[in-house]
Amino acid sequence: MKKHILASAAGISLILAASSASAQVYSPDFDGFVSGTDYFAGVSLYSYGYDADDGGNVYKALQYGQWGRVAPDADFIDVGGGDIQARANTDGKNNARLLGTFVDPTLFAAGSGTYNFSVDYTGADAGASWIYLYKATGVTTDGSNDLILDVANGGFGAFDPFYGTGAAQVTQLIAYNIADETQNEAYSVDFEYTAGDIIGIAFGSYNAAGTFDNVVIAVPEPSTYALLAGCFALTGVMVRRRR
């Protein structure tokens, strides 16, 4: 009987591990980021998929999963032991600086539905820090229907880090102001996704040097817990029968 119970527990652990792994949609590993490949700097406006000079506004192209930032304030920095985290700004900089990316729609294999977005913030000095999540439709890469990421602004206020031109439609999903930039915070929120949407992620700071890490978009897992409950119930039945 003990062997049977142990085998059942092991099976439950394997189910949990497999379900957790398959639930993740997007989880960039900043620790392996390479400048010029995984992230770019030097301009304030990044567009999905193409470079352009639009009336003096230089758009630098970002492909899915690549990050854009403003140099030198926004950067991916080593906070010790090879742990690379995203820093949107530095102390004493009285302006809004951000870094962000576009997430590939094909990663959302489950299609439309509820997803969870989470990120860890490590506090530093006082200031203002924001977490943004946007979705976009009708985007092309020919310059007619643009998805633009703006990583520099005088302040936050009504500032939108993502916007569209032409027929591109951009909708804000999350604009979260971190209440205390000196404290660490684990932020997590569910959002509704429609298949085919491009998701935009951006982190911003004003006169603050806090860092962001452990970014994850995943399918919420109530089904996993229901499955585990069923497994425990089944194990209980089998134990009683063995008795």
Image (tube, rainbow, N blue to C red):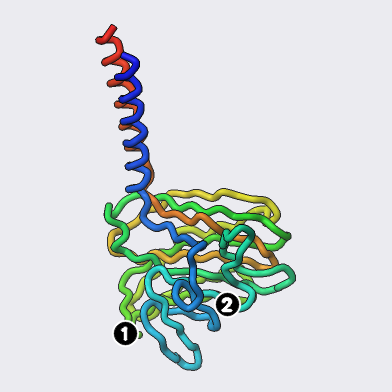
Sequence-first tag of 2 and 1: 2
Amino acid on which the number 2 mark rests in the picture: Val
Quarter of the image with the N terminus is top left
Q: Residues within 10 Å of mark 2 (few under 14, many from 20)?
A: many
Look at 29% across and 10% down and name the residue there: 240
Q: Quadrant of residue 52?
A: bottom left
Report the residue at 70% width, 54% height from top: 182
Image coordinates of residue 158 in percent, x first then y, are: 57, 69
Residue drawn at x 29%, y 6% as measured from the top left: 243
The residue to which callout 2 is attached is: 70
In the picture of the structure, the residue carrying the numbered disc 1 is: 142
Amino acid, disc 1: Asp
Mark whose residue sits in front, 2 or 1: 2
In the picture as drawn, the residue positioned furthest to the front comes out as 3
Disc number placed over residue 90 in the picture, else none = none
Q: Nearer the viewer, residue 230 or 165?
A: 230
Count the marks: 2
Cα separation, mark 2 vs mark 1, equals 24 Å
Are circles 2 and 1 on residues that touch, CB within 8 Å? Answer: no
The x, y position of residue 241, in whole percent, is 25, 10
Above-or-below relation of 226 to 88 = above
Determine the image quadrant of residue 61.
bottom left
Crowd around label 1: few <14 · some 14–19 · many ≥20 (10 Å): few
- Determine the secondary structure under disc 2: loop
**Residue 64 percent across, percent down from the top left:** 37, 70
